[in-house]
Image (cartoon, rainbow, N blue to C red):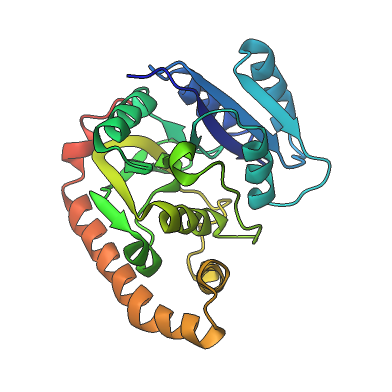
Amino acid sequence: MENTLVSVIMPTYNAAHWVAESIDSILSQTYSNWELIITDDCSTDNTRDILKTYEQKDQRIKIIYAETNLGAGHTRNKCIEHAQGRYIAFCDSDDRWMPQKLEKQLAFMQEKDCCMAYASYITCNEHGENTGVIIAPKRQNLFQTKCDDKIGFLTCIYDTYKTGGKMYMPVQRKRQDYAYVLQILKKCQYAYGIQEPLAYYRLHSESISANKWSLIKYEMLTWRTVFGDSKMHAFLFFIFFFLPAYCWKKICVWVTNQNKNKYLNTITT
């Protein structure tokens, strides 16, 4: 496999409880040619002290300290601006990767000759206890993803050579990661999923995505931003396409998690 640089993007804000685990999961990767670019969005806890310790620990870790709090979209874009890698991947400061994530995804992308890849992932609570599993579909296109986002952003990686260069996120306050995936799919048409879980997604009360109902308006804002939909078109799409697809996904997740132990028992935390 070609030893190509991967830029890992991580925004931080008051992440002192979890950021060390997130960074350690990057340091533990079996694929070693990566850079971790972190932008701290004016944390008021001791997140910055932790970041400075890691910056001194490994030269592959680069920290940017924002002067004003602007939100995850701005901080991710600041990271992307400084990224040097052909491949760009994302890990939030409360999530973790499994050690072979990058190695397996890069081999998979080479095999598929694809622009973007993602994977299944394990959900856990704020204490790090595994609670379930989300199985990635094998392939997603633009329309399927507009109907319902089944691509776990913490597992997402894309090839900037195939998109014509680095891409930047819309700076809306929420769901900018979803908008970003849609923008990439407009370029490459399909993204491909690995069925094996390769990351841990932490569910906790402080997460931006914790309240799903509050995200509804941002789903419609995303369609208006990416596709130019009118307010009425976005509303109708939400009722007749998004809601049925979302409900079906929740049913599939429930069925999968009735047998979740066959996944969780094989995972070493």
- The residue closer to the viewer here, 252 or 1, is 1
Quarter placement of the N terminus: top left
Choose top left, top right, bottom left or bottom right for residue 61. Answer: top right
x and y percent of residue 124 in the render? 39, 42
x and y percent of residue 57 in the render? 63, 11
**166 left or right, relative to 188:** right
User: Could one spot residue 127 in this view of the protein?
Assistant: no
- Residue found at the very far bottom of the displayed protein: 232
Q: Residue at x 73, y 31 (%)?
A: 64
- The residue closer to the viewer here, 228 or 48, is 228
Above/below status of 123 relative to 199: below
**172 left or right, relative to 99:** right
Above/below status of 240 relative to 11: below
x and y percent of residue 130 in the render? 34, 39
Q: Residue at x 33, y 44 (%)?
A: 131
Above/below status of 181 relative to 27: below
- The residue closer to the viewer here, 163 or 41, is 163
Quarter placement of the C terminus: top left
Number of numbered discs visible in the structure rendering:
0
Q: Residue at x 66, y 57 (%)?
A: 171
User: Could one spot residue 72 in this view of the protein?
Assistant: yes
**191 left or right, relative to 163:** left
**198 left or right, relative to 153:** left
x and y percent of residue 252 in the render? 22, 60
Q: Residue at x 55, y 84 (%)?
A: 231
